[in-house]
Image: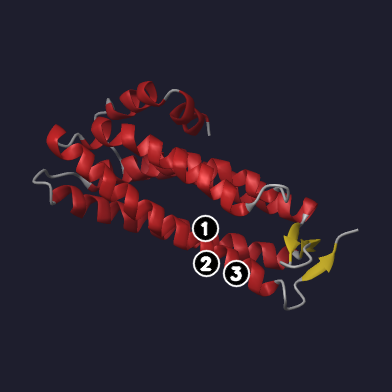
């Protein structure tokens, strides 16, 4: 979590330290950085939904409290989509980077993408607060993630300077599409269950 905060407030120096590591190992990045922040995101958002509830309905919205089973299904779906984006996205970034006539390791691509997504997962904790719209949380999170990616690509993947901007634009575009679609699908899991006796009215 500290690294994700540093990527937001002191991105250049933090990426410089990450890029200075002799080798980017997938296991180290996942277990020491991504897994803890994903767990924090799941627990924080889930507890917020259970404690404060969420808004249901469009014409006459009302505050409802989701069942524990529904929150678990929602967080499980969201976590699965996150993992697909992280591991599958790293392969995509590698292929994309290789197309710019420079070879990159899977570890470099995984670290670049994984560290960049940290701020998005961190901001998601606020999604458990009903006063904040879920798409506002996503918009702030993806903006921070894309900003982090801008600094991360040169420090970790080290593409040719002439190709760095093109690589950044293409990866950012793919990241916005995939994370946006994943967020939409996860929200659908929550909203579809809202009309199938999965809620009780808040008091």
Residue occupied by mark 3: 189
Look at mark 1 in the image and give the residue it sits on: 79
Q: Residue at x 33, y 58 (%)?
A: 88
**Horizontal placement of 89 versus 131: left or right?**
left
Image quadrant assignment for residue 187: bottom right
Give the residue at x 39% y 58%: 177
- Where does the image place residue 124, in percent across and percent down from the top left? 58, 47
Asked if marks 3 and 2 touch (Cβ < 8 Å), the reply is yes
The location of residue 135, given as percent across then percent down, is 57, 53
Q: Is residue 8 above or below residue 144?
A: above
User: Would you name the residue on which mark 2 appears?
Assistant: 185
Quadrant of the snapshot with the C terminus: bottom right
Counting residues from the N terminus, which is met first, the one under dot 1 or under dot 2?
1
In whole angstroms, how far apart are the C-alphas of marks 3 and 2? 6 Å
Q: Position of residue 125 (x, y in %)?
A: 62, 45
* Depth check, front residue: 57 or 36: 57
Q: Given the current orientation, which residue lies at the most extreme right position? A: 203
Between the C-alphas of marks 1 and 3, the distance is 12 Å
């Amino acid at each position: 979590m500290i690294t994700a905060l540093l990527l937001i407030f002191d991105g250049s120096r933090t990426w410089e330290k990450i890029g200075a590591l002799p080798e980017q190992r997938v296991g180290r990045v996942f277990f020491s950085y991504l897994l803890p922040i994903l767990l924090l995101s799941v627990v924080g958002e889930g507890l917020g939904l259970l404690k404060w509830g969420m808004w249901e309905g469009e014409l006459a919205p009302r505050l409802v409290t989701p069942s524990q089973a529904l929150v678990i299904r929602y967080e499980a779906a969201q976590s699965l989509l996150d993992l697909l984006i992280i591991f599958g996205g790293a392969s995509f970034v590698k292929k994309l980077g290789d197309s710019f006539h420079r070879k990159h390791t899977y570890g470099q691509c995984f670290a670049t993408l994984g560290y960049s997504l940290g701020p998005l997962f961190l901001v998601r904790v606020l999604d458990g607060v009903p006063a904040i719209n879920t798409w506002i949380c996503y918009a702030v999170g993806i903006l921070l993630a894309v900003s982090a990616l801008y600094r991360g690509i040169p420090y970790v993947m080290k593409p040719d300077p002439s190709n760095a901007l093109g690589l950044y634009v293409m990866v950012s575009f793919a990241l916005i599409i995939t994370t946006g679609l994943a967020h939409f699908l996860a929200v659908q899991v929550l909203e579809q269950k809202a009309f199938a006796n999965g809620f009780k009215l808040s008091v």
